[in-house]
Amino acid sequence: MADTFTKTERSGIMRAVRGRGNKVTELALARLFRKHRVRGWRRRADVFGKPDFLFPAQKVAVFIDGCFWHGCPKHLRMPASNAEYWTSKINRNKQRDLLVSRTLKRKGWHVLRIWEHEIRNAEALMLRIRQALGQTASRRKVR
């Protein structure tokens, strides 16, 4: 299917995509943390790779990866137009993600990478995050 926008219009649209504060991902996860009483997280911390959330006490770095931008194996739909550019762009993003994860792990951090689509299954996601934080079962209950 052909793009309905000119190259300049499409470029402007893609440039407007926010890298931080995305309501679908980061802000939704922050709401889940509050709802499930997950404490100790910080945002915009000055740590290599710029994790979306950081739990400094437990040395856990959380990244929320958008299904398109980070090449989700379940949901990535590669654009038909300019496919070579997009394939290269997404592969560079994946390589950068790998470098960031490896570097943080070498520095003693536990790295959690969460796909954008995983936010829809809040219970499973919160269980995974609590396990990474080393929280006990008795703390999981929300009243």
Image (cartoon, helix red, strand yellow):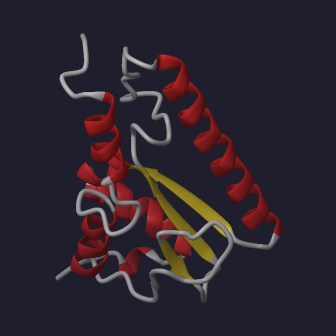
Q: Is residue 117 visible?
A: no
Q: Nearer the viewer, residue 135 or 75?
A: 75
Residue 118 lies left or right of residue 57; in this view the side is: left
**Vertical placement of 78 versus 29: above or below?**
above
The image position of residue 89, as x and y in percent, is 56, 35
Q: Nearer the viewer, residue 19 or 8?
A: 8
Picture quarter with the N terminus: top left
Q: Quadrant of residue 80?
A: top left
Q: Quadrant of residue 111?
A: bottom right
In this rendering, does residue 66 appear at all?
A: yes
| Residue at screen point 40% across, 37% down | 68
Q: Position of residue 112 (x, y in %)?
A: 55, 60
In this rendering, the count of numbered labels is 0
Residue 7 image offset from top left, x and y in percent: 33, 30
Q: Nearer the viewer, residue 38 or 16?
A: 16
Q: Residue at x 37, y 21 (%)?
A: 79
Question: In the displayed structure, would residue 1 be above or below residue 66?
Answer: above
Residue 143: x, y in percent?
16, 82
Q: Residue at x 53, y 78 (%)?
A: 54
Looking at the image, is 37 positioned above or below residue 4? Answer: below
Instruction: Report the side of 15 relative to 120 (left or right).
Output: right
Toward the right, the furthest residue is 106
**Residue under the point 30% across and 74% down:** 30
Camera-nearest residue between 141 and 24: 24
